[in-house]
Amino acid sequence: MRERLQHLIAERLTGYAEGLGIALPAEQLELSEPPDPAMGDFAMNLPMKLARVARRAPIAIAGEIADLLRDVDVFAKVEVAPPGYINLTLADYAVSGALQAIVADANLKLMKEGVPQTVVLDYSGVNIAKQMHVGHLRSTIIGDVIGRVLEARGERVIRQNHLGDWGLPIAMVLWKAGLVLRDIEARGDDPLQVLTVADLEQIYRDATAAVKVDPNASEEVHRILVELQSGDPRLLADWQTITRLSMQEVYRVYTDLGVQLTMEDERGESFYRDQLAGTVASLTACGALTESQGAMCVFLEQFKGKDGQPLPVIVQKSDGGYNYETFDLAAIRFRIEGLSADRVIYVTDARQALHFAQVFAVADLCGWTVRGSERVALEHVTFGSVLGEDGKPLKTRSGENVKLVDLLDEAVARAYAVVNEKNPDLPEDQKRAVARAVGIGAVKYSDLRQDRNNDYVFDWDRMLALVGNTAPYLQYAHARICSIFRKGGVEEDTITTAPEVSHPAERALALKLLAFAEVVEDVEAELRPHALCTYLYELATAFSSFYDQCPVLTAETEASKQARLALCRAAQRTLARGLDLLGIEAPREM
Ligand code: ARG
């Protein structure tokens, strides 16, 4: 809507602006919301901008522009506001018409025009033989939303789960796990049934402890690493078992979370093992490498340590081993050449900012990001930490990292109590389903609604509250609309009436609904899901004040009832679609 208006106004004013000697691109014509909705639907500061260039009084320019816009039909009111703003009020028919155009589209106009881009989306990136912790939660759910939003806009998304599955920690586990696995096999048991990731963590702890006190152990682990990397079949088979064992627990969490990652998206560090030597060779060929104390490094001018000395990007250690950086460099080449990425997005916490900045700079230096006349965009989407009530990174009472499964179980249990209290008559299995949707939704939403770079305090009571900017509040608003249809015996799919508006609360709701696609567009451009949360919260609030003021099923006339039902339907679809983009379920009854 906003965009269409911008074009319309720009067209109207081109001649006028030219008269002042100014070219007027539609993009420069910003329409904002006036501070008070009673002033109008949109505010425009263009007169102030033009006045500056033309060296004239803004109020005079505003008057002249207002005169030119007054006879455009879609505006019911065009008013000048000092010192040089113009407030615009749309005609009711224009609001209804625009909304009708949106609801007529199954996709609510989210799809963009033009050729889709191929976007490689790297998120979650869990580590094998280790529990997923709350830190991985953020990457997983923020990445998931980004994937859903890009797809809704029509992009081709290739998800990549860059597992930490190849390196020293794995060798440590393999060293001690061998005996355990042989034992299980001798008993005729399946390790995937009898071992857990918690067991693997214990094995890892035992191994680290042994290595600390015994130099031979350390040598042994290194030997195992070398043998694994050169393809020893026994070690590879055990590595495979450990990977599957870990991932089966991870998939349980993904399923709980409703996250779209599957086995096909797994492309861990191990995938690149045969491309590492080639990657180092390419770096040598482009002249980027320097040997420093036996290690192969790239020195980049722009990265200096605290002491002012250049910070090396080490791509091969003096013992011949490769680093986290090397895997990522190999992955960049694969993603651009092998997956034809136009854009690569990485979702990890802000502490990896230097890592990605360096790796991206090396890729640029060697020209890997240039394809034809285009430059492939490499973007790091960062986020802050989840804190406990004490303001320190979230830990359990005994001081361990909080496990994700436990956290989600608790969320569902707490939500069950809320549902049980609110709606005791709901059948038991429905109570459970709603509790899942609400509990998981609350955890995800309380994370997504924050500007992702902020740290936030994990607060059960706030996230499960039925009022305020929470998932349950939005889900509740959605369920309330469904209950209107239920009570009225209305088949919502059959609603085709135009959502006519006349009452201020109807207009306010309709105008909110008109902004949906713009908000999704912004989320895509900035990769910031919280803008969508803020929008959905405002939408739910606008619905609630509409519903308080405008009776639907008992509207005065049949025409008004139908028009209001159409508005309800538009609001319900938008809420459901918005929640779906956030990966949150919208139950029909709560
Ligand atoms: N496994 C890494 C970690 O847990 C995250 C991987 C992120 N992706 C990447 N391409 N480096 O920190």
Image (cartoon, rainbow, N blue to C red):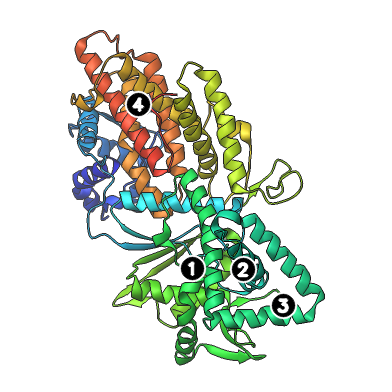
The answer to whether marks 4 and 3 mark residues whose Cβ atoms lie closer than 8 Å is no
Q: Which residue is mark 1?
A: 268
The residue singled out by tag 4 in the image is: 508
For label 3, the SS is loop
- In the displayed structure, would residue 456 be above or below residue 359? above
In the rendering, at what x and y percent does residue 140 appear?
50, 53
Residue hosting label 3? 307
> Who comes first in sequence, dot 1 or dot 2?
2
- In this rendered view, identify the residue nearer to me: 304 or 449: 449
Mark 3 or 1, nearer chain start: 1
For label 2, the residue is: 182
- How many C-alpha atoms fall within 10 Å of the one at disc 2: few (<14), some, or many (≥20)? few
Image check: 116 left or right of 266? Answer: left
* C-alpha gap between disc 1 and disc 2: 26 Å
State the mark number for residue 199. none
Circles 4 and 2: CB atoms closer than 8 Å: no
Secondary element at tag 1: loop
* Residue type at tag 1: Gly
Crowd class of label 1 (few under 14; some 14 to 19; many from 20; radius 10 Å): many
Mark 3 and mark 2: span between their CA atoms?
A: 51 Å
Marks 4 and 2, Cα distance to the nearest angstrom?
68 Å
For marks 1 and 4, give the CA distance. 49 Å
